Image (cartoon, grey):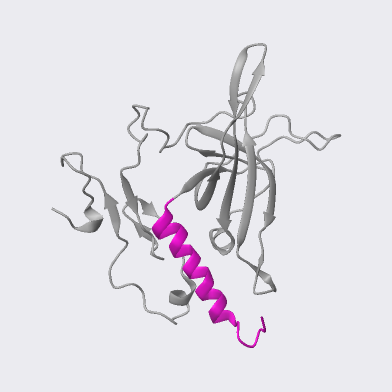
Amino acid sequence: MSRLFITTREIDFISDLTKEIIKDVIGQKIFYYNISLIKSKVHDLYSEAPDKIFEMPVVIDCRVKWMSPEIRTNNFGTEEYYKIEAYVHGRDMIQRGISLNIGDFFSYGDVFFEVTSLFNMRNIFGQVEHVDGWKISATQSRQSNFVSKVFGPTSETHTDADAVQKDFYQQRGFESNDEGGTGDMRDLVRKGVLDPPISGPAKVKADDDVTRDDASFYDET
């Protein structure tokens, strides 16, 4: 597609539209742990860090492809072994200053994964400087490799307070919502092409007191 017709405004529109779908509609997320290159002690000869130190986790909105576990049998019985793919918005990572690297870890549910491969999915209309996102492939990490606090949601079979996510808050390009700072940015609004949304970020908030599946998003009583 010619650059004559696909200008910066169209690229911004595509970026904002995909952000809206990922952040304001789908609502999937992972908790991502970057390896700290400053805090981790690297071996002088082998340039490896046997004991890696990780930064505090950051929440990344994405699309997740959950795969059925592989069942492995060993001397101790059987175990489930998971693999997963996460699709992350490219410009969102740039604007939030998040660096993705092979060897990092993230959690989805109550399972921790190690990033094994990472690459750009595709260019936007053939413009090499604009990519739509990153595809992260990861395999389940053993507890001996990485241990951290588990953040919800995890499973409704658990009794933790955040095992089931009852509230979902949109972002819509606002600096903050009811959950705190978002780091979200919509380029057409930032550049003055569009006005900010008149209403704030909507939220889906379940009420345990009701006897049927009502949610405040639909303004039902």
**Is 40 above or below relative to 217?**
above
Q: How many marks?
A: 0
* In the displayed structure image, the side of residue 151 where residue 196 appears, left or right: left
Compared to 202, does 199 lie above or below? below
Residue at the far bottom in the pictured view: 4
Is residue 119 found left or right of 8 in the rendered image? right
Of residue 47 and residue 101, the one placed in the foreground of this image is: 101
| Residue 164, x across and y down, in percent | 35, 37
Q: Is residue 95 above or below residue 153?
A: below
Give the position of the N terminus as an image quadrant. bottom right
- Residue at 73 percent of width and 29 percent of height: 50
Magenta part of the chain: 1-27
Q: Is residue 184 visible?
A: no
Image location of residue 51, percent across then percent down: 69, 29
Q: Is residue 3 magenta?
A: yes
Q: Residue furthest top?
A: 75
**Front position in the image: 46 or 142:** 142
Rendered position, 140 above or below 115:
above
Residue 140 lies within the magenta run: no
Residue drawn at (18%, 43%), measured in percent from left and top?
Answer: 212
Is 84 on the left-hand or right-hand side of 110?
right
Toward the right, the furthest residue is: 45
